Structures are given as C-alpha cells and as structure tokens.
C-alpha cells in the first residue's frame, strides 16, 4: 500500500519525513495540506488528522504517525537504514532532539516570519533576535562537522536527515551556506546521495516560486 | 556507581532528566553548572563536557549522554519504566519531540528572557510574540488532556516527564495553571507521584529564591 504523507513543500519538517522515505525507496505519495490558508487550524483537521495542528502526518494503512522524528524512526525501522552502526543510535537520537529543540524549530519559524507573512506584519525585533540565536546554532553544527562527512559515524543517518530539514531552501532566513564551510560541505554530501531531491521537487508547494 | 548529572536548578531541560532518574529510583547526584556566569560557553566546557553547550549532561561511568530526551530514554531502558504499555512507545516519543519542538524550547527561552536577563535587556516584542505562540502550545496540550490523567495510556511515561519540564516553576513566563484546567489537573497527578520533587529541591539553583 502506498504511504501517504500529509505535507506542503514549504515545510522543512515535512521534508525530513519525505526525504527519508524517498532515500529509503519506500512507496509513498504527498497529500497537499493548505497550511497557508489555515487548513491545519480547522477543527475538522485537528479532529481527523492531527490534534497538534502540524504537518507532517504519515498514514500507512491503519498506522498514523506525526512528528517528523517519529516518522523518520518508522522509516528507519521499515527500511533497516539510517540508524547508524551498532552503538550509534543514541548519538543519532541526540542530534534529532537537538535539531527539534534548537535548529529546525527556530529556523522554520524565522523563515516563516521573513517570507510567508505579509511584509507589514513581519516582527523585526523577533526576526533579529532569532537570527542571533540561530547563528549560535549553526556554529555548533559547523564546529561538529569539521573533519566529518556526516553528523554521526561514517554513513548518513537520521541525524543528517533531520538537521538538513530547512537548509536547502533558498528563501532568505539568515542562513548562508558560504559562511559555514563545514555545513556547506556536509549539505553537498547529502545532495550527492542517490535519490536526493530538493523539497520543492518532493512535495507540492503552496506558493509559486519567484 | 553514582550517576552524575551536570545541571542547574533553573533548567527545565535538566529537570526532565533529574526527575526521571529520581522517580526511577536511580542512584544519582547533581553536578552544578554555573550557566549564568558563562560556564557552558567556555571552550573548555564545550571540549570536555558538551560541544552543544547545553545542560543536562549525564555521566554514568564511561557513558556520557546529552539532550534530555536521550537521557530519559536511557533511564527508561535501565529502569524498565516510563515507556508506556506495549505499542505505546511511538506515541510517547511523539510527545517528547513535540515538547522539544514546541513546548520546552519556547517556554524555556521565554522564561529566561523574562526572569534571568537584566531588566533593561529584556526584549519586549520577542517576549510578547513568544507568549502568543506558547498559548497555542498550551491549548494543544490542554485539549489533549481533557478526560485523560496522563498524556499517553494509563500510566506516567516520558511524555509526561518531558512536557512538564518547565511547568512547575513559579517565575512568571506567561503560564498560569489556573487558565488551563486539564493541564493543571495533570500536573497535580505528576506532583502526587511517590518521590516527586520540585526542580529546586532536586538540583542546586544559581540564584537565591525571592
């Protein structure tokens, strides 16, 4: 049965799930969620799809999972991939939590404020503050990746597929690959994986590209 | 061997790890980290303790773990507790990720800005914005807890011990238990557990109480 992923192209959190499924070679298809017009805020969507009001939501037969980290964990279990070598799982999980706590959460919000709110509603002080916090976050990742090809061990794991969630998007949110040489090299490694695709080539986007 | 937890009382993320160990009856002790005076920002601390620059850090013999979710997972594995009934683990993990992504991350930052920065440095627009986002977050949790005693299943799991991380603190950060009846009742359930302690009774705090 084809797995369905409720998602939209602009969501880096949805991308994490989509990319893991695509690289694992699972049979899946996107189901477009009209986030920008409020679909996830409706009572019906919360009751029937996800009470947390968030994408991604994965439906595989009777199984419904939400939170990108949980979906990625399921993909790893089904495919036998991306959990690292024996003994590496806790380190993989550590970076997944860090990503949720410090990287994707803050990058996603900042990118939303800077690109998907009407210009007159963009809160300048918040954006400035978040960009400062994000610089410390990028620094941690860049320092960790010095001399490494991937975040944990020798092969791509969910740590990589989680932390890269927002970093391939071109819309400005204060992240410039050229400033972070180790992150830039690591993103290049992910892009060179067989089957890698940009978020907008994996999932339908809400807005036309410019 | 006594487990060491590098922590400080004001950190709700450290509290999640400390509370799990305490309720599981593990032999542990806190090691105070002088966060407010910059200890986690020093090169020595990042090199020797945690490159992410964050507490908590758990040391159990040769094993060093960071990220509260990973430490909680280890405590659950060692103690055989808090993972829920068979088949509930993914739902537990889902709420742990949600907490890292939406609740503790945002509540922790907002509480820091409102209480532990000098008054003249508190960014009013950021605090106001974050409080608005947090209200949506509390609403999701409160709605979920209507008619439930715990977040997943029938017994306390890591989902509860993660989501409650910042919610027992008295310092103002825009969260008032009286406004959220289901959350209030659920927090009472956790407080009534055998061995429950307030964060400041489990870990040394950096600042004197007022």
Image (cartoon, coloured by chain):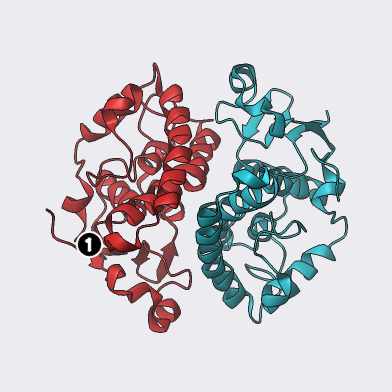
Chain colours: A cyan, B red
Kindly tell me whether residue A25 is visible in this rendering: no
Residue A139's quadrant in the figure? bottom right
Residue B76 left/right relative to A65: left
Q: Residue at x 83, y 31 (%)?
A: A2
Q: Where is residue A116 in the image (x, y as percent from the top left)?
A: 69, 44
The residue at the point 25 percent across, 68 percent down is B31
Above-or-below relation of A23 to A174: above
Q: In this view, does B133 lie to the left or right of A188?
A: left
Chain ID of residue with mark 1: B
Q: Can residue B127 be seen in this view?
A: yes
Question: In x, y percent, where is residue A71?
Answer: 66, 41
- Quadrant of res B143: top left
Nearer the observer, A177 or B153: A177
Q: In which quadrant is the N terminus of chain A drawn?
A: top right
Disc 1 secondary structure class:
strand
Is B205 left or right of A138, judged from the image as shown? left
Please name the residue that numbered disc 1 is placed on.
Answer: B29
Q: Quadrant of residue B35?
A: bottom left
Q: Position of A147 compared to A29: left or right?
A: left
Residue A176 in the image: above or below residue B193: below
Q: Position of residue A66 (x, y in %)?
A: 62, 35
> In x, y percent, where is residue B34?
27, 71
Q: How crowded is mark 1: few (under 14 residues within 10 Å), some or many (20 or more)?
A: some
Residue visible at 37% across and 63% down in the picture? B55
Give above or below for A4 relative to B204.
Answer: above
């Amino acid at each position: 049965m084809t797995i369905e992923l409720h998602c939209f192209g602009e969501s880096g959190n949805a991308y994490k799930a989509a990319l893991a499924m695509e690289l694992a070679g699972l049979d899946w298809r996107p189901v477009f969620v009209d986030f920008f017009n409020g679909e996830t805020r409706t009572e019906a969507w919360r009751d029937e799809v996800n009470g947390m009001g968030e994408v991604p939501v994965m439906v595989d037969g009777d199984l419904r999972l939400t939170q990108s980290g949980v979906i990625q964990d399921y993909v790893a279990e089904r495919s036998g991939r991306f959990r690292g070598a024996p003994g590496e799982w806790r380190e993989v999980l550590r970076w997944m939590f860090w990503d949720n706590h410090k990287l994707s959460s803050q990058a996603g919000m900042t990118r939303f404020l800077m690109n998907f709110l009407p210009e007159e509603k963009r809160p300048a002080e918040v954006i400035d503050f978040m960009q400062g916090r994000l610089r410390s976050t990028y620094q941690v990742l860049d320092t960790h990746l010095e001399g490494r090809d991937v975040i944990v061990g020798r092969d791509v794991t969910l740590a990589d597929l989680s932390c890269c969630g927002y970093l391939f998007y071109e819309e400005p949110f204060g992240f410039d690959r050229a400033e972070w040489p180790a992150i830039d090299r690591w993103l290049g490694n992910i892009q060179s994986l067989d089957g890698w695709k940009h978020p907008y080539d994996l999932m339908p986007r809400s807005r036309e590209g410019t």
